[in-house]
Image (cartoon, rainbow, N blue to C red):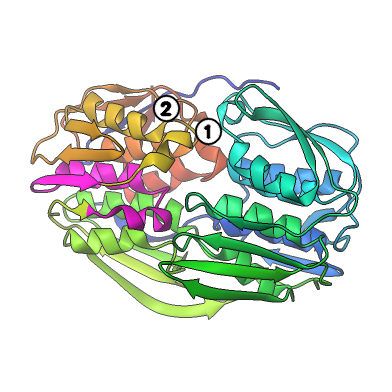
Amino acid sequence: MESQPAKPLTAGRSTAPLSGEIAVPGDKSISHRALMFGALAVGQTRITGLLQGEDVLRTAAAMRALGAEIRKDGESWIVAGRGIGALTAPDDVLDMGNSGTAARLLAGILATHDFYSVMTGDASLRTRPMKRVIEPLKMSGATFTARAGDRLPLTIQGARDALPISYRLPVASAQVKSAVLLAGLNARGITEVEEPEPTRDHSENMLRHFGAELTVSQQGKGRVIRLTGQPELRGADVAVPGDPSSAAFPLVAGLLVPGSRLTIRNVGLNPLRTGLFDTLREMGADLTIRNARTQGGELLGDVIVEHTALNAVDVPPERAPSMIDEYLILAVACATARGTSRLRGLAELRVKESDRLAATAAMLRAGGVRVEIEGDDLIVHGAARIPGGGLVQTHMDHRLAMSALVFGQITEAEMRVDDATFIDTSFPGFVTLMHQLGARITAS
């Protein structure tokens, strides 16, 4: 795979309020799933608002390689699906780029199709563990061969007569849950997943939207999802809302830069994705929702945010599944808050695009913020003045790069980012959008 040249950027303190009305790219989680479910459905699926970042385009390419027809039609994407169990063996290795979500979900699909396939990814994705999906998916009858440490490249021989899986997640993970459900689509009988606490439910919502028979029941603090195998999914229109994880970056910038006021339109408000909004409100943020509505099984609305002096927060570990991708930018907000914040139970951050727990602490330290890691907790000491002036190593992590560029809007001296190339995997046009709001970001 060809490596791209590094793209260093510098972020300087905003000298004027950020203002404007914007929309962020489509939700990445929903975009991946819309392409996959469309490929597994009979008939045509029309997708509007699809995120056209590199991660999602890798999913589109993979589904084409497996036999689905996918094309762009103006602002929409059209998927002509193959039907459950009717995907065909790819002629080449499936390269998932930087997307752990795409790789893990696709492993579920491939596990119950009776052919041989190989998945790989970029240098970052090849360091990330796949054992968490390999172990349950083996129960279907599939066989897997991976590099040491259960890392990509990964070979998969799908099951000839796939068995339904019954699995209790050892830790909350929407990716593992979704992989098991996707495997269950092509297995006779009932596939059952028990999660210890609720995780984002885009897969369940979309399965219902395409016509699958699926039930969800509460069990203690968690849930049990049961899927009837071998349904006939029918093509369905999907309108992808704005990604709340992407909205988090301009949103927090608007909270932190004095005098700012922003409106972010059509943001996904799935209750299992809005932990950051709840946390910011606990910190005193002036954050309101208008025009809330449901579209294609998903709640969305307009988010309005104004500059607010924030207070420190103690975030409980059980909130992690609803904001796992937002802790980096939340830590930036905590750096400005009055008092000491403690973000608890962040073990999952250690196995993301980078070790995000260590990388977040390093980013804040590069700006002169006092921060500690105790076990799986991140402790951030807020300050009225943040010196800045440091260099942030992004480790090929798009969210770390964006968080650092927002961080630089509030530090006394400029913050430098070693490589922002990977921002395009989830938020194409991020720097341009931030410029439109008045942010100071320049090439280094």
Q: Which amino acid, mark 1?
A: Phe
Residue found 19% across the figure and 32% down from its top = 371
Answer left or right for 43 relative to 393. right
Task: Write down the region rendered in magenta.
Answer: 315-343
The C terminus appears in which quarter of the rendering? top left
Question: What is the CA distance from the residue labelled 1 to the residue labelled 2?
Answer: 9 Å
Q: Is residue 6 magenta?
A: no
Answer left or right for 373 relative to 418. left
From this viewpoint, is residue 443 visible?
yes
Mark 1 and mark 2 lie on one chain; the one further toward the N terminus is: 2
Residue 2 occupies which quadrant of the picture?
A: top right
Q: In the rendering, which numbered label is found on residue 422?
A: 1
Q: Is residue 335 magenta?
A: yes
Q: Compared to 326, does 395 lie above or below?
A: above
- Residue 135: horizontal and vertical position, in percent? 65, 42
Between 401 and 121, the one lying in front of the other is 121
Residue found 90% across the figure and 49% down from its top = 160
Which residue position is annotated with label 2? Answer: 394
Answer left or right for 271 relative to 134. left
The N terminus appears in which quarter of the rendering? top right
- Residue 294: horizontal and vertical position, in percent? 52, 79
